[in-house]
Image: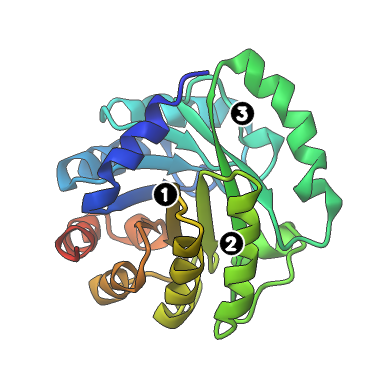
Amino acid sequence: MKDRVFKKLLEEKKNKIHLTLIDPDKTSPEMARLISLSAYKAGSSAILIGGSLGVYEPHLTELVKSCKESGLPVILFPGNINGLTASADAVLFMLLLNSDDPYYVGGVQAQAAPIILRMGLETIPTAYIIIGHGGAAGYIGKARPIPYERGDIAAAYSLAGAMLGAKVIYLEAGSGAPYPIPPQTISLVRRALDQIEYNGLLIVGGGINSPEAAREAIKAGADGIVNGTIVEKDPNSIYHMIKAVKNEN
């Protein structure tokens, strides 16, 4: 499968990446279309679609099709096999590295791989690492969230993901997290990845609810951020978030 979507994101790395996350359980197709159009106009790099609860395929497919009207790439961010649809452009093919459940570090991937192949989706190998609050993703994925302040542990997991071949290292505090991942933790991860000349993407999500928090994450070394909850509450906030991300080089 072609890696068109990943190459696009990699090309945007120098100017930083913004990903708009839409949760199918909380969003109608019409609202998803409006959010996606706003994301496109504001300069977001792609639409992520996924959630930990309440996802079912017919609604997911309809929602993906609505998002594609924006012209932005639509990337699946699945919590499980029910988060897959052939209507998307790509899928984050994830290992939840700090899960205590083997299902999330091998089992679900083996079940999903033949389905993804038949769907013809571009796969983006992703090391998914839960930090701090963790939210629903951490709870459902049976993760042992890394403490916010233990950047050394986050760096070790990130190195492991990179050495396993992940194209994306995704540090996740969880949707609606009360606090974002601290800049110091992001910096430690960045320095560790730089030691092996990592040529992928370091993406940070969860609890980034202000332009200041977005700017700090980028300044600390993230290649991009994910916004979900704040965009659901106020779609216009995306303009301020993207301005903060793109202006911090």
**In-image side of 210 versus 50 (left or right):** left
Decide if residue 241 is in sight here.
yes
**Distance between mark 1 and mark 3 Cα atoms:** 17 Å
Which amino acid type corresponds to the residue marked 3 in the rendered image?
A: Glu
Which is nearer the N-term, disc 3 or disc 2?
3
Residue 176 versus residue 148 in the image, above or below:
above
Disc on res. 21: 1
Q: Earlier in the sequence, mark 1 or mark 3?
A: 1
Q: Which residue is mark 2?
A: 158
Is disc 3 placed on a helix, strand or loop? helix
Q: Which sits earlier in the primary sequence, circle 2 or circle 1?
A: 1
Tell me how far mark 2 sits from mark 1, CA to CA: 22 Å
Q: Residue at x 26, y 54 (%)?
A: 16
Could you say where residue 107 lies in the image, as x and y percent from the top left? 82, 40
Q: Nearer the viewer, mark 2 or mark 1?
A: 2
Identify the amino acid type marked 2. Ser
Q: CA distance from mark 3 to mark 2?
A: 31 Å
